[in-house]
Image (cartoon, rainbow, N blue to C red):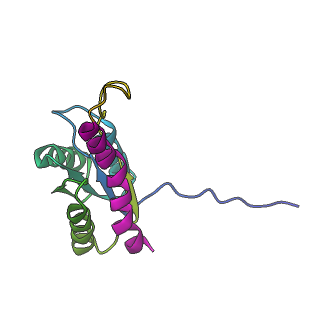
Amino acid sequence: MSEEFTRPTRSLKGRVAIVTGAGSLGDGIGNGRASAILLAEAGAQVVCVDLEIELAERTVAMIRADGDIESIAIKADVAVEEDCKAVVAETIRRFGRVDILVNIVGIGGALGSAKEVDMGEWARGMEINVASMVMMAKYSIPEME
């Protein structure tokens, strides 16, 4: 008995991706910028989100230099719930859908041992590294469904 296997496509044409932390200093390629560029190369329209709009705009420029993929930059602090909600709303307004969420934004967090740690810095790290992912998912997943 012979089964015919159809290999799935790797194309993301027609898909819309949000990438948080999509900026990177200068022409450097950090995880967020690399993710955004690779998603665009696969055909996705990419929403590049960063606290520093100039860095996200540089990522968009790099994507556009590689081809005719539509992408936009949005300034947002993804540790702020209203900003997360606004990113998803703007994505829906511009592209009509959300298919992919890549939460890359993150910081090193508080330094020191449990005896020395500054709890304010620790809480800020948790807010940026963990809560931001939950909040972006909270607003993205209903649109994906």
User: Image height check: is 51 above or below 70?
Assistant: above
Residue 120 sits in quarter: top left
Q: Position of residue 35 (x, y in %)?
A: 35, 45
Q: Nearer the viewer, residue 17 or 10?
A: 17
The rendered magenta stretch, by its main secondary structure, is classed as helix
Magenta span contains residue 19: no
Q: Nearer the viewer, residue 40 or 22?
A: 22
Q: Position of residue 145 (x, y in %)?
A: 45, 74
What's the residue at 11%, 45% (across, down)? 54
Boundaries of the magenta span: 119-145
Q: What residue occupies the far right of the structure in this picture?
A: 1
Q: Nearer the viewer, residue 46 or 84?
A: 84
Q: What residue occupies the far left of the structure in this picture?
A: 54
Quarter of the image where the N terminus is located? bottom right
Q: Is residue 78 left or right of residue 114?
A: left
Q: Position of residue 36 (x, y in %)?
A: 31, 48
Q: Position of residue 118 (x, y in %)?
A: 26, 33
Q: What residue occupies the far front of the structure in this picture?
A: 115
Q: Does any portion of residue 2 appear in the rendered image?
A: yes
Q: Is residue 6 left or right of residue 61?
A: right
What's the residue at 20%, 62% (across, down)? 83
Q: How many marks?
A: 0
Q: Does any portion of residue 14 appear in the rendered image?
A: no
What's the residue at 38%, 58% (across, down)? 134
Magenta span contains residue 130: yes
